[in-house]
Image: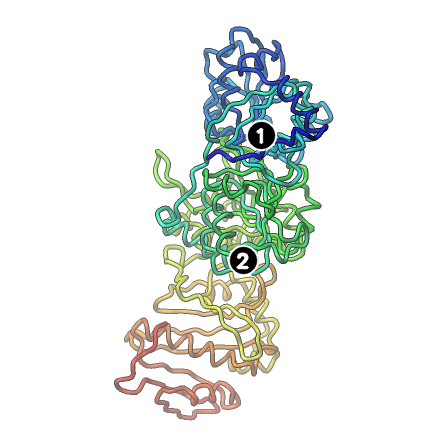
Amino acid sequence: MRFVIEPANRNHAMAEDWTSQYSDKLMPPKAAVRKIKRGDRVFIGSACGEPRELVRAMVSLSNQLADTEVIQVLPLADSPYVDPRYASNFRANALFVGDSMREAINSARADYTPVFLSQVPALFRMRRLPIDVAMITVSPPDAHGHCSLGVSVDVTKAAAESAKMVIAMVNRHMPRTYGDCHIHVDQIHALVQHDEPLVSWPASDPGNVLDPVTRQIAAHVSRLVPDGATLQLGIGRIPDLILSTLTNKNDLGIHTEMLSDGVMALTRQGVITGRHKTLNRGKIVASFAAGTPALFEFLHENPMVEMRPSEYTNDLFNISQHDNMIAINAAVRVDLTGLVSAGSVGARFSSGFGGHADFVRGAALSRGGKPVIVMPSTEMTPQGLRSRIVASLPEGAGIATTRGDAHYIVTEYGVAYLHGKSIRDRAMALIGLAHPDFRDELLDAAKKRQMVYPNQILEAASKKYPSELEEQITLPDGSSITLRPIRPEDESLMKDMFYSFSEQTVYLRYHHVVRSMPHEQLQEFCNVDYDTEMTIVAVAGPPSAQQIVGVVLYNRDPNGQSAELAFAVVDGWQRKGLGTILFDKIVRVARSRGIERYTAEVLVENSGMLKIFHRSNMKIQTRMDSGVVHVEMWDEPGQTPPAA
C-alpha cells in the first residue's frame, strides 16, 4: 500500500529551501550507487526496511567495485552480494544472521560479528566500525523536509548519522512513523525515488499454527504475565504466537526491539493500552517492525507508536525503569545448570545476540520484572527426536544467557525458576521440563557429573505429568494459591515445609515426634506415579519465592477401589479453609480414577481434620483404637462424582 503524503507548502521559504535540495539530489539508482568507492564499508538498512532497489543496483555494478564490505542487521530479503561469483567484489558482515546469509557465513564466504544490539550504534558513532556509505529506505519528506525511517530505526539511524555518505531510497510504501526516527533531506547525499512493497515478515495464523506444544508453552507464559505488565518479545515464532493467547489480559504495554502483527492485533482488541507503563506511558515503543502490509498500514502516522533507535529501546536502564517488565525470548538449548544457548546450533551460527541479553538483564532489574526463556522440549533432526534440555551444551554453542542471568525457563511441560537456586535444584527442575522420553538419561548424566544425589530417583520420569489437575484457588481471606500434583523437583520445597511445622503439627500428622526429614524419605514422597498414588500440593507465592503451604495425598489399596488419605497444612495457613479445599480436591481426583471408598487414621486430638471429614457429603464411619480414630468414607449410592 502506498501512503499519501501531503505536498510541502511551497509558499514557505524553508519549504522552498529543502525542496530545491530534494530536486537537486534526485538521481537514478545506478547513478546513486556509483558514489560507492572500492574498499568502502556499506551499511544496508535492516529487516523490512531494506532498500532492495539500491541493493540490486549495487550488485549490477559489481564489476566497478572491489573489496566492498556490506554491513547488515537481520537481512530478511535476498542477499545477492553473498553469491560466490561476487567474492572479489563484496564481503558481507552480518551483525545478526538472517536466513539469506546463514549458509554463506557458515561456509566462510561471509563474516558474522557477535555484538549486543544496544552496542551497535556506538560502534558506528565512535568509528570502531566506521560506515562510509549508508543505503537506507525512507518515507517521502513531510512539509518540513523530514523523512521517516519508518519500520527500520534500530541501528539504521546511527549508521545514517555517522556515515560519510547517505543514499536514501524514497518509497511511498514506507509508513511515516513517529518517535526518534527522522532524517532531514539536507542530511541525505543522494535520493532515489522508487516505490515497491516493503519486505514482509509473514504473520502466523494462530488458528493454524498454534500446535499443542506451542499452545501449552503459551499457557504457561500467560500465567506469568500480570495485568498492566510491559512486554518485550524477541524474534521467533513462539514469542510472537504467545501474543495471540493474551487476549484475556488488561492494559498491557510494549517496550521491545521488534514490533509484530501480534502487537497490532492486541492493540486493536484493547488489550495493549500502555496505561500503566512507567516509561513512555500510553506509547508502544519499538526499534523496528517486522510483519505484513497490514502492520505497516497500522504504523502509518499512528501517534500511539514511537519508533526509537536501539540504543534507547535496548538500554538496560530504560528497560529496567518499566515495572513488571516481562521479556520473552526463545532459545535453542538449555543445559542442566541453566546455561541458555541461542544464536547457534553447536558451532553453526543461526542468528545472533540481537536484544536477547539486553532484555534478559533489563527485565531482571525491573521491579516485578521477569526474564522468560521459551522453547519446545524437543527438536526433530535427521538423526531423530532430540531433547533441547541437555546435560551439557555442544561444542561451539553460543551462550545467550549465563547461569547467573537465567530466571524463568518454559517448555510445554511447565515453568522452572532458576535464579538463586543450587545446581542440584536447577538440574531437577530442568529435568522436569524435558520430554519424558529423555528424563532418565538426563538424570543419569546429572549423577555422573555429581550434580544430584547419587541415589536420586525419578520414578515419575516416564509418567505424564497431569497438568490438567493444576488449579488456581482464592481462599476466603483473599490469599491466592495453586493446587497441583507434586513433582520430583519439589524436594527442597517439601523440606522447607516440614521444618516450618510446629511440633504439634508434626505430631498430629505423623502420630509421633519426627525430628528430621532426610533426602531418602523426601524423594520417595516427591516421586509418585499419579495413579496408584497421588499427592497434591498447595503452592503460595510467585515462582521466584514459592512455598508449599499444604499437602494432601492418597495411596490406592490393592483392590483398586479404595485409598488411604492424609494431609497437612502449614501452621500459618491453618484455619483459612485450605484443609477443606485440599480434601475436596483429592477426593475429586480419586473419584475420577475410579476410587469409591476412602480411609484415614486421625489422632483424636486432631479435631480440625475430623471436622473436615464429617462436613463432607459422604457417608462416614469411625471407630476408636488407642487414641487413633479410624475413619472410613464412601459416597451415597447413586451420587454423581464431580469432575476432578
Image position of 39 (left or right of 592): right
Q: Residue beneath label 1, please?
A: 140
Residue at the spot 45% in from the left edge and 38% down from the top edge: 292
**What secondary structure is marked by label 1?**
loop
Q: Is residue 438 above or below residue 523?
A: above
Q: Residue beneath label 2, please?
A: 224
Of residues 185 and 517, the one nearer the viewer is 185
Residue 425 seen in this snapshot: no
Residue at the spot 54% in from the left edge and 36% down from the top edge: 175
Q: Horizontal and vertical percent for residue 346?
A: 49, 32
**Three-letter amino acid code at the position of disc 1:** Pro
Of residues 414 and 446, the one nearer the viewer is 414
Residue at the spot 32% in from the left edge and 84% down from the top edge: 635
**Three-letter amino acid code at the position of disc 2:** Leu
**What secondary structure is marked by label 2?**
loop
Residue 643, by quadrant, is bottom left
Image position of 588 (left or right of 168): left
Of residues 124 and 571, the one nearer the viewer is 124
